[in-house]
Amino acid sequence: MNAFKHFLFRALIALLLLAVPVFGVWTWVKAPEWGLWFPENVSTYGDSIDGLFMLILWMVTVTFIGTEVLLVWFVWRYSKKDPTRAVYTHGNHTLEMVWSAIPAVLLIVVAISQMKAWTTVKIDFPDDGPYTVEKPMMEVYASQFDWRVRYPDASGNFTGTDVIEVPYDITVPVNTKVVFHLRSRDVLHSFFVPKFRLKQDAVPGMVIPVWFEAEEVGSYDLICAELCGWGHYKMAGKIHVLAQDEYERWLAEKRKALYATE
Amino acid sequence: MSSHAHAPQKPLGIDPPGTVHVTHDHHELGFLRKYIFSVDHKVIGLQFLFTGLVMLLLGGLMAMAIRWQLAYPWTEMPLLGRILFPETGGVTTPEGYTMLFTMHGTLMIFFVIIPLLTGTFGNYLIPLMIGAPDMAFPKLNMLGYWFWWPGIVCIILAFGAEGGGPAAGWTSYPPLSTIEAAAPGSLSGQTWWLLSLTFVGVSSMMGAVNYVTTIVKMRAPGMTMFRMPLSIWGLLIAALLQLFALPVLTAGSFLQLFDRVFDAGFFTPTGTIINNTSPEALGKAAGGHPLLWQHLFWFYSHPAVYILVLPAMGFVSDILSVHGRKPIFGYKPMCYSMAGIAGLGFIVWGHHMFQSGMNPSVGLVFMTATIMIALPSAVKVFNWLGTLWGARIQLTTAMLFAIAFVSMFIIGGLSGIWMASTPVDIYIHDTYIVVAHFHYVVFAGSMMGIFAAIHHWFPKMFGRLMNETLGKIHFVGTFILINGVFYMMHQVGLAGLMRRTADPYAYETYAHLQPVNEFISLCAFGLLAWQIFFVINFFGSMIWGTRAGRNPWKATSLEWEAPSPPGHGNFDKQLAVYHGPYEFGVPGAAEDYVMQTQRQVT
């Protein structure tokens, strides 16, 4: 290859490698505009999850830009035709210590920073509201390919004739810590509500407590997030978050309907 | 080894240099013994290479079918559609879609990446790079390849099985996979899948036993462990992972097979009603637990993820050093970090199960271990950068792919931190961020490593160089299109898109994602088409390539001492190793590289 062609080829490769951090960052900057971002959050703990995502996003972006730009620079700089020999070194002990210790500390900080949010969502269930793990608001059953909700009778029992069963749609009150039991009748499913930042697998044979508190009235997609068979893609449900009094009215109507049909 | 049973046996290390490598009597073998049922590690390596590349094409075509459905759901798929879905006129069916991604994952992991990395390069390179005449157990080595074939036959039969191919994902979570009523693919396709995996496991095990024994016992005089090229370290650690982890998967597969064939209930809980049938009423046992399978499966399959990347890390280290004409930066930290990745790799399987219903407190332990695995990975990246600093980079195709590996591995490695973090994982678990992450590691990473290794060792394998112009055209297009395919999957996943969803646009949440998915799909079709340059180059260079000679790259490791391609018994001269393989740019040396067999000039 003659000198000019070599220069052009080096430039092409360097630009190609540079495109990785440039486009890489640009797409993240543009993503919200393109609708490729978190859907809006409506749960109490969602913000902390988004925040932790952003914390990691910032950390990895800095590392990403730093390492990729170094890579581009080294490839550009050291692919120059040069009759002299490369730097003869087998490494540097101090550097190894530095670039092991700094990431180690940062990673431990990341690990610790995550623990509180996880504990809030999955370990420490609310015990100060009307609903608790022992006294859940409802049972959600997943099965191929639908969701069914069971609301207990007035005294909180899930057995007997007064239990209300509703397919597909889950209705809950706003600003209430909703604790429920998640079950599956057949295979694995997963209870995923993007706008709540909530996901929990439903496992046959297990009763798994789940909780959330919605802060805004509205209807939200409930999506099955664990492969459950050919109809997995259409195992859709809706969560309707109602104002407290509307919820009471809805529940009362359901109860009335229960007796009306009998 | 039988051929030199007559050679005086002395313990290694006491021998005068080269005694292990007695010249082999040249005995002519028939075509069948020479090319088909060969015990020569080089032929076996090439058999794995050719078979693996064919399987890569099959797995790639399935990816295209998946991408078609995601871009244009429920429309007639051109070309492939008529073959895959003749009964619907080429339109994907929902159950067909689940089978497609199940088989894509299975093929790519068990029939492409693992065999290409360990089967091909493990076989081909280990004896050559450590200066041995062949593997420790050549017949076992041959069996290792031929036990792979029943695996291939079973996985192909799975397609034609009653009800269709397995459809429970490559992870095959029960009860979906074990109860016939749960999915059409669970009628008998899943049984074929389990049999296939068992054969593949036996094949890998035979290979792993061989690799470890050969590396430990058959190194040339003077080739201490810390004088081995990093490729060999990567392959050794991957083989150790296979040895320790595979038995668990095999045991798990047998349990699942028992559940399916003998009505056992290891993974079937009591009281399930699946598709209006109770497994117990049909005489199946129950009382098992679905999570047991997940633990057994991931205890193997997480270390397997590192089997999928460690050898590639080794190749890339060697290629960066050879084509950068500079010693690898931090050789021992590179070894230790690979060992660290492997060691930690055994205690992180639970991160696949954060949302599974496993005790959430355990999740915190798995999270911490998983986040810490980023540390040895980061150390590797820094050392690769250190290697390039001050180098004399030769922009060969092999080098370009090796550099691409580093660039892509950075992305795949960094995005792993999100997945490791339990609270963030609540949202992104099973979304396309995960899909982006592992494709950046395994496809944009390991596959680039494999392309680099093919270009680098092709001259040794076939005695001819690959065409550089075609290679560079292949590289540039592949590099652009790979990022076109996988990068935006991060953002699509952030928008919440779930993997394994045949038609996401039915959901309000995903309705606006179709244009991005269409872009990704178009890039994917382009990526597959672009590989034509590789195919032409690969086969064309075998015939028309420039003759390579023994050492076209002026590399230092032992394989370049042998003729290209090496004959039976590999070396035609006595070898003794005096130093590591990274003596490039040595001040005062006559040339810019000092072979491992040359005494160091200092």
Image (cartoon, coloured by chain):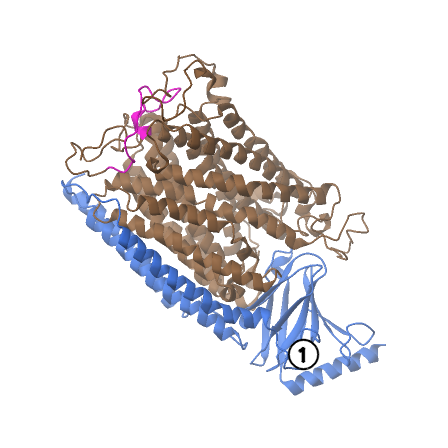
Could you tell me which residue is drawn at 65 percent across and 78 percent down?
A: A172
Please provide percent x and percent y for residue B395.
Answer: 25, 42
Q: Chain A is drawn in which colour?
A: blue
Please provide percent x and percent y for residue B180.
Answer: 72, 47
Could you tell me which residue is drawn at 60 percent across and 37 percent down?
A: B198
**Is the magenta region chiefly helix, strand or loop?**
loop
Could you tell me which residue is drawn at 23 percent across and 29 percent down?
A: B599
**Res B526 visible:** no
On screen, residue A73 above or below B194: below
On screen, residue B555 above or below B438: above
The answer to which of A113 and B507 lies nearer the viewer is A113
**Res B587 visible:** yes
**In terms of secondary structure, where does tag 1 sit?**
loop
Could you tell me which residue is drawn at 63 percent across and 58 percent down?
A: A232
Q: Chain B is drawn in which colour?
A: brown
The answer to which of A256 and B578 lies nearer the viewer is B578
According to the image, label 1 marks what residue?
Answer: A131
**In the rendered structure, which segment of residues is drawn in magenta?**
B558-583
